[in-house]
């Protein structure tokens, strides 16, 4: 059986897809990139915001068309959107053959075996994952599932459930398997990395896991994504100072800076605590890059609230800031509030914040010109790029941040061009708004 895969949404969903595809492969499936050649198409849906929901519906309809335009015999829908709206999807999309939410996933593969799509099970190693992307040197390790935070705007707990930490030993073993598949950078992900182990009495915490991963593998780069400010402890900061394989980078979502809005959003931080954690990180790790996210247009946000957010962002000068406009999500606490910020005003505020951050990013990158950095090579750059090879420095996370273009090695197709997954020492020679250009050192 040939399996086609459409994996949508966040990197956590990508990990889910890789694990599920491994189960399919363990039952005789062969992964194909051409949906028209697939016997079964698996769609991992996203239900986070309205745009993601639409993308998921479109992907399901695209897969269903392959039942008449290709050789597809079955379409399988899994993931967050299915978890949120199982009955509605079954009613509105009869073209899709199977719907499985997170609670039902253990039944999916046995069901396909019973219907003759898959063979009986082969033996898989615990933590086995099948990579089906384009850059196997960059991988993600999901250390927990679900979320215990009660942010008013977020539906993730409704889809993913309560926070559940994965066993430390299983995570080390999974990291070893990823390294065996060629991983040179492993990004640690969860809804909040700082909550790791809190559901296990006397269990290991995030610093314990980091030490175990470093001891159990030789992966050059480990990167931490999604750490709430409360999880940034002195012990964690000490590890960032002493462990060179922990890249000096942290993704710390704040969502807002006005205390009134943080309280309305049911966020655990306040401006004072956010400011203190940023100062702690920058004092201890001067080279650290801090990424954050902000939400504009939440119900009740006034011009004064927004100005406070803008002034805070301008003062703290985050290296990266992803901004989003609020949209009500079914079942959340905020959905019961009056959405009193007009859509046009939301978009104006969003545009202003993005433009301010663009200028901050450009200024901060300009400060890096002349600096020597290690660049993890991702591969040939796209046509029209500033240089033939593209990669990332330690302060550029995969997919969400800018990149480092490498010039000076001739055409990317040359045999002596640096290979994807290799590290190149280079000097930054030019800064753009979000990217930099560097020249390899001899």
Image: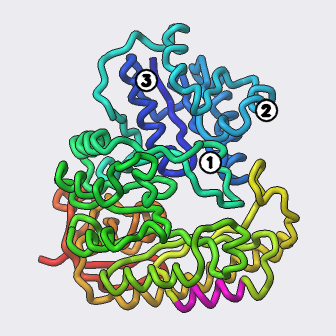
Q: Which of the two residues, 261 or 431, is positioned nearer the viewer here? A: 261
| Secondary structure found at label 2 | helix
Q: Nearer the viewer, mark 3 or mark 1?
A: 1
Looking at the rendered image, the quarter that the N terminus falls into is top left
Separation (CA) of disc 2 from disc 3:
27 Å
Can residue 404 be seen from the camera position used here?
Answer: no
**Magenta part of the chain:** 306-315
Q: Which of the two residues, 95 or 236, is positioned nearer the viewer here? A: 236
- Residue at horizontal 25 percent and vertical 54 percent from the top: 184
Q: Is residue 310 magenta?
A: yes
- Residue of label 3: 24
Looking at the rendered image, the quarter that the C terminus falls into is bottom left
Separation (CA) of disc 3 from disc 1:
27 Å
- Residue of label 1: 157
Q: Nearer the viewer, mark 2 or mark 3?
A: 2
- Residue at horizontal 35 percent and vertical 55 percent from the top: 205
Q: Which of the two residues, 310 or 192, is positioned nearer the viewer here? A: 192
Corner quadrant of residue 416 = bottom left
* Residue 29 % position (x, y): 41, 21
Q: Nearer the viewer, mark 2 or mark 1?
A: 1
Q: Is residue 51 left or right of residue 16?
A: right
Q: Is residue 334 left or right of residue 211?
A: right
| Secondary structure found at label 1 | helix
Instruction: Using the image, tell me which numbered label, if any, was put on residue 88.
Output: 2
Q: Is residue 79 left or right of residue 17?
A: right
Q: Residue furthest left?
A: 442
* Residue 270 % position (x, y): 59, 78
Q: Main secondary structure of the magenta part?
A: helix
- The mark that comes first in sequence, 2 or 3, is 3
Q: Which of the two residues, 401 or 23, is positioned nearer the viewer here? A: 23
- The mark that comes first in sequence, 3 or 1, is 3
């Amino acid at each position: 059986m040939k399996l086609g895969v459409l994996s949508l949404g966040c990197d956590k969903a990508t990990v889910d897809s890789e694990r599920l595809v491994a189960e399919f492969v363990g039952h005789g499936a062969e992964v194909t990139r051409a949906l028209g050649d697939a016997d079964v198409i698996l769609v991992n849906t996203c239900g986070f915001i309205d745009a993601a929901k639409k993308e998921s519906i479109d992907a399901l309809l695209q897969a269903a068309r392959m039942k008449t335009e290709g050789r597809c015999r079955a379409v399988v829908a899994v993931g967050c959107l299915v978890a949120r709206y199982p009955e509605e999807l079954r009613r509105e999309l009869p073209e899709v053959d199977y719907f499985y939410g997170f609670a039902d996933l253990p039944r999916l593969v046995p069901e396909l075996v019973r219907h003759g799509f898959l063979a009986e099970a082969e033996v898989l190693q615990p933590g086995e994952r099948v990579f089906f992307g384009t850059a196997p040197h960059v991988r993600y390790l999901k250390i927990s599932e679900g979320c215990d935070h009660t942010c008013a705007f977020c539906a993730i707990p409704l889809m993913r459930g309560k926070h559940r930490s994965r066993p430390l030993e299983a995570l080390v073993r999974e990291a070893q398997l990823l390294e065996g598949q060629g991983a040179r950078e492993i990004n640690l992900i969860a809804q909040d990395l700082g909550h790791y182990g809190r559901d296990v009495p006397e269990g290991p915490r995030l610093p314990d896991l980091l030490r175990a991963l470093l001891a159990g593998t030789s992966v050059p780069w480990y990167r931490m994504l999604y750490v709430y400010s409360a999880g940034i402890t002195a012990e964690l900061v000490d590890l960032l100072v002493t462990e060179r394989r922990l890249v000096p980078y942290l993704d710390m979502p704040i969502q807002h800076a006005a205390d009134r809005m943080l309280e309305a959003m049911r966020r655990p931080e306040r401006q004072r605590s956010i400011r203190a954690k940023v100062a702690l990180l920058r004092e201890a790790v001067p080279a650290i890059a801090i990424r954050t996210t902000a939400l504009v247009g939440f119900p009740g946000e006034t011009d004064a609230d927004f100005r406070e957010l803008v002034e805070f962002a301008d003062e703290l000068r985050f290296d990266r800031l992803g901004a989003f406009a609020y949209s009500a999500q079914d079942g959340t606490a905020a959905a019961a509030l009056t959405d009193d910020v007009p859509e046009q005003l939301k978009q104006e505020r969003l545009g202003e914040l993005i433009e301010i951050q663009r200028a901050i990013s450009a200024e901060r990158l300009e400060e890096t010109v002349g600096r020597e950095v290690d660049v993890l090579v991702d591969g040939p750059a796209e046509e029209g790029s500033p240089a033939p090879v593209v990669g990332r420095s330690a302060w550029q996370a995969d997919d969400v941040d800018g990149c480092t273009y490498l010039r000076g090695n001739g055409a990317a197709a040359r045999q002596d061009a640096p290979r994807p997954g290799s590290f190149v020492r280079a000097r930054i020679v030019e800064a753009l708004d979000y990217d930099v250009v560097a020249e390899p050192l001899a």
